[in-house]
Image (cartoon, coloured by chain):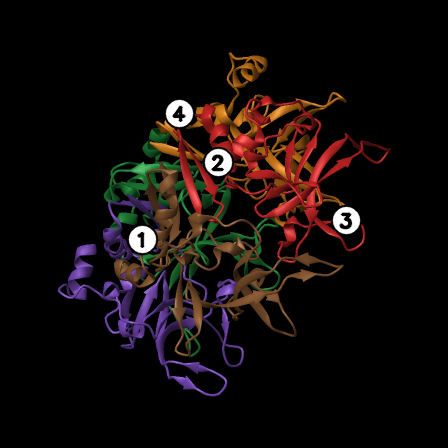
Chain colours: A green, B orange, C red, D brown, E purple
Amino acid sequence: MLHIEFTTDLGAKVTVDVESAAQLLDVQRQYGRLGWTSGSIPTGGYQFPLENEPDFDWHLIGARKWTSPDGEELIIHKGHAYRRRELEAVDSRKMKLPAAVKYSRGAKSSDPEHVREKADGDFEYVTLCFFRGGKRQDRYAAPARRSPARTEDQAA
Amino acid sequence: MLHIEFTTDLGAKVTVDVESAAQLLDVQRQYGRLGWTSGSIPTGGYQFPLENEPDFDWHLIGARKWTSPDGEELIIHKGHAYRRRELEAVDSRKMKLPAAVKYSRGAKSSDPEHVREKADGDFEYVTLCFFRGGKRQDRYAAPARRSPARTEDQAA
Amino acid sequence: MLHIEFTTDLGAKVTVDVESAAQLLDVQRQYGRLGWTSGSIPTGGYQFPLENEPDFDWHLIGARKWTSPDGEELIIHKGHAYRRRELEAVDSRKMKLPAAVKYSRGAKSSDPEHVREKADGDFEYVTLCFFRGGKRQDRYAAPARRSPARTEDQAA
Amino acid sequence: MLHIEFTTDLGAKVTVDVESAAQLLDVQRQYGRLGWTSGSIPTGGYQFPLENEPDFDWHLIGARKWTSPDGEELIIHKGHAYRRRELEAVDSRKMKLPAAVKYSRGAKSSDPEHVREKADGDFEYVTLCFFRGGKRQDRYAAPARRSPARTEDQAA
Amino acid sequence: MLHIEFTTDLGAKVTVDVESAAQLLDVQRQYGRLGWTSGSIPTGGYQFPLENEPDFDWHLIGARKWTSPDGEELIIHKGHAYRRRELEAVDSRKMKLPAAVKYSRGAKSSDPEHVREKADGDFEYVTLCFFRGGKRQDRYAAPARRSPARTEDQAA
């Protein structure tokens, strides 16, 4: 038996029993759909393989896609909206970085110091996750058969 | 089986077993009525839909309504009294914010730095919650049939 | 089933199973008598009704009465001795506070910054609890039939 | 049923079920012999009665005696070596302290600020425990029949 | 029954039940192979006996060996790459240190202050572990029969 600790959408601390390790990701999907999260965003953001970006299952980390009134696709995580950014590969003498996709947002005054990252000028931002390098892991993909709309219905 | 962690009205750390996810909010109501809380106030305060404000069930977060000797309605949460404030919608070139209702209190000398927010002048305050935007969620409403008075009796 | 987390007199972290919510305070009394505590002192100290002060059951918070060689009655909590202080009611234009009884001690060099409160001059103190206002709650009272001496025997 | 949380010798967080409160100290001895600890060193160090010092069971707090190549008896706790120091009673007008035995070590650069205590000059030290005053508690004593050598064998 | 707390490769907090203390290290190997870790890196890094270095089972702490495109052998732990460094014994009048092997990496801007260690100039690094002194413990060794390649297959 396993037990996974969540922070619910109401901020409550709730542990859920899980029969086996094989069912763990499905339990994370099931409760993540409701906005429940387990653990906190790792320093510098979650790291996933670049090949997982197109069909990544955001419910796994308690996040969801949301289209703004302006038509922009954003990721909502714990009430914050993160924007998609493509980073080109860097191949200079000083450093070598593969291409990546990053989801980040501008820092707010209520963000603690250790999650803020400096950008150009006075601007500070907070990173939710990086998709970079690695090898695609199918277990991170959104379930294929179920359309996002139907998934939302089931969670309601 | 689920397990929810509370801080009791005496400051003790107590976990309560819950049979199913469907019963979770009722368990939060049951113990919240006694002033038990789960988790801590999220940075910047809890976020609820504006349409939930009129009949919000404060027991869900371990809070309760209280009428002061001066006749003012306040929200008591962990021994602190929060005052209701209506914020008008902002629609300027710089920012765009929908109308909101906010419950906050003046900061005390014993409040840690990270919960204090600056206001005009030297004044600092602490936010319990925001009701803003979103879509009404019936599950956040106070039970309709039971009057507040009877609910208090049952908790006694 | 409930589960309460204690820090034992040896500093160990131990959780105790409790059959029902009705038994919780008795379990806190039983282990509190041994100096076990659950949770930490709330910022600014525990808050209890003033009417509970005369027969407050200090075991509820893992504390006990102790008479010093000088004949002074002190409260011992986690190895620190707290002294009783009566605070008169304040009723000025600037603030309005009811009469209170406070248990506090001078700060030590090993006390963390956030528990120290400034007093006159360089003096700093740490508050264990306040008895102020509110309505007497019988559940906070020391059991009437058992004398303190006999209670100590049973714990031994 | 009780449950005690340990940090293992590998730094893992492991909880052990314990049938009754009466067995708790024996479980602490059993795992403490392997270097497992529960909770952290209290601010200012553990406090034990002076009369417990001669036969104190160091396994209770996850520590052990170790004789250095120079023949000095040290206490090893979580990889640090603590030295025994006898403190004479102080009886001046300014303060009154009973005789004590203290186990401490010099601070290292990786020690966090809040465990460092200032001594003469620039020297800083970290205290594991104090044996001072109080009344001997037999439950803190090392088991009499088993010699320390045999105990080590059984743990191996 | 024992219960071990892990942070999974997705950052989730998951507890796994373990039948007996004898099975604990195998459970750590099983989940560590997936990048799950229990507890955090001790201040100054894990400490292991020098004789355990050649066949140390990195899965025990949720780490794994990885050969970079340049052919360098690195240790990957929670997404960071640590490099092997041999430290010669020091035997001066000022200090006496046995030979050691250390795994460390350069500090990143997102590393918290308390894990950074100063080196020459402005360079700062973070230590994963030290192999130094002590007596070989067979329980830390990688299982002999299974080749690393096959172990990876089983985890997939």
C117 is higher (above) or lower (below) than E142: above
Quarter holding the C terminus of chain D is: bottom left
Q: Check disc 3 and report its element: helix, strand or loop.
A: loop
Are marks 4 and 2 in one subunit?
Answer: no
Residue appearing at x 29%, y 40% in the figure:
A26
Sequence-earlier tag: 3 or 2: 3
Please provide percent x and percent y for residue B44. Answer: 59, 42
Whether labels 4 and 1 belong to a single chain: the reply is no
The N terminus of chain D, quarter of image: top left
Which element type, helix, strand or loop, lies under badge 1? helix
Q: What is the residue that sits farthest to the front in this orientation? A: D145
- Residue C155's mark? 2
What is the C-alpha distance between the residues marked 1 and 2? 60 Å
Q: Is residue A26 left or right of residue A87?
A: left
Q: Residues within 10 Å of mark 3 (few under 14, many from 20)?
A: few
Q: Are marks 3 and 2 on the same chain?
A: yes
The amino acid type of the residue labelled 1 equals Asn
**Residue C74 image point, x, y percent:** 66, 41
Residue to which mark 4 is pinned: B23
* Residue in front for this viewpoint, D130 or C89: D130
